[in-house]
Image (cartoon, rainbow, N blue to C red):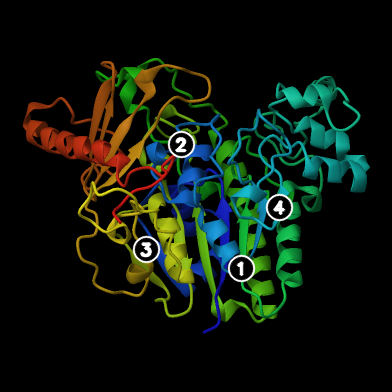
Amino acid sequence: MKKPDIVFFMVDQLSAKWLEAACGGVVPLPNIERLKTLGTTFTNAITSNPLCCPARATLATGLTTRGHGVLENGYQLDPALPTFMRTLQEEGWRTGAFGKVHFHPHYRSLRPDYTPYGFDFVHNTEDSRGGEWLDWVESEHPEHYEAALATIWPSNIPEYASYGPEGRDLRSRIKEARANMKWAIPEFPLSDGGHYTLPFPEEVSQTDWITGHAERFIRETPSGQPLYAHISYVQPHSPFCAPAEYMKAVNVDRIPAPLPAEWVDEYGPAELKRRTPNMPEHWRYCRQLYFADLAHLDRQLGRILDLLAEAGRLENAYIVFLADHGEMLHDHGLRAKAEKHYDACIRIPLVVTGPGLRSGCECDELVQLEDICPTVLDISGQRFPVMPKMGRHMDEDAADIARLPGRSLLPLCRGEEVDEWREAAYCESYNNISSTNPGQWARTIRTKQFRYTFYPRGSGEQLFDLRADPDEQANLAMLPEHAGTRQELRDRLMELIVLQDYPKTRRDLFALGVH
């Protein structure tokens, strides 16, 4: 039987909520709609940790946050841990990563080496902009180099102070480029350094650069060899910066207004009370840029789908479309992600297509990022290696010991009855990048009806009835008439917290099992 191709089309910081709004009339996304007709759309996919590094580590290893140890941005994923990419590579797949991988912290290196994780080919560009894409702009589009420098927001990354083989001081040059950039233009007078239309053509963007390398990889893979393409975009992560030509595709009259910041006048949680609600007058422009970026990304998906068809690979290809986490986008007066466990933050888009799977279907079962790795292993007919056996301290055979916390999604994609599927999803946060406060260590259980979140150190609780209150405006946590529901969810949350260490982590594990 011919081994299938596997393609990940991954975007950064896209909520299922905003994708649903886009498809509901805000902006045409014909290729995403096309993909949905080919496979199964999961409407209740929950990120396990709504930050880039932890979510992507879970994606690759199938482990929980505590299992792989990447608690928050700033940690590096241990390449000694098994990844599905390396398993595919060892079994004959040609593997390539294009764009944002983010298994390494940005502040460690602008040129990370991702080959130890199981990639044969890597063309990497991430939020920091530095490295291969920036060097390509300087070489191939020097007329746009200053504008590219102006889009670099984390100029305090140490490597910018001594950049490249020559040790150039790009940090000062970046600051100068940003100071001199005229973000606001007559057509888009609300632009500034935090949200703007790209100051260079679409074909110079990171997005198009990523797609171009992925296309080359697909074309150059021998027809008889299976491929795994990890195509991962920086957008629509902030700063929101769509190409100007996509702005007109957005129906600004259909852009939903931000949900009110309900937590301002309630008793908690204290972690949100420390914030100032962020509801700028130009919220509609921010959202227009975000939705315009989705149209740009949709075009990239069309390029990949068309190429797979042209290369004769589409019929035998499994395609996974997903995001790592969401974006608040001013809902509840909040931006970004992390410990703000509202729907826009933790529910992500997920579409799975492939041979033998149902087409044009929706599944409302609760799924998590932990399910992606076992799904890929199931697609490829692989399993992570059995851990070595030693000692006689166990009655179980090592082959029967659970290896991953998640489960393959393929049975759901085939429409099969699945026994004992989870009835609740779990999401957790540690610190955001600018804090060391454990009050932000939010722990959440989400069922189809409720979302309950606990913030430690007296920082508060949230309980929302998602059926009666899908906009999460009425916190029921301390109302006497909901005490029973609160206690039941607290008990279930406690069990999920404990089970984050099951199966036992493979970190530093020499052996487990019996003779």
Question: Label 3, label 1: how many angstroms apart (C-alpha)?
Answer: 20 Å
463 and 99: which one is in front? 99
Earlier in the chain: of badge 1 and badge 2, it is 1
Q: Which mark is residue 122?
A: 4
As measured in the structure, the alpha-carbon distance from the residue carrying label 3 to the one carrying label 4 is: 27 Å
Disc on the earlier residue, 4 or 1: 1
Kindly tell me whether residue 49 is visible in this rendering. Answer: yes
Can you tell which of label 3 and label 1 is closer to the viewer? Answer: 1
Instruction: State which mark lies toward you, 4 or 1.
Output: 1
Name the quadrant containing residue 212: bottom right
Mark 1 highlights which residue? Answer: 93
Instruction: Tell me which numbered mark, 3 or 2, is placed earlier along the sequence.
Output: 2
Q: How many marks?
A: 4
Dot 2: what SS? loop
Question: Which amino acid type is marked by label 3?
Answer: Ser
Label 3: state its secondary structure. Answer: loop
Residue 93 percent location from the top left of the image:
61, 68
Q: Which mark is residue 408?
A: 3
Q: Going by the image, does 326 lie left or right of 445?
A: right
Mark nearest the camera among 1 and 2 is: 1
- Distance of mark 2 from mark 4, alpha carbons? 31 Å
Q: Residues within 10 Å of mark 2 (few under 14, many from 20)?
A: many
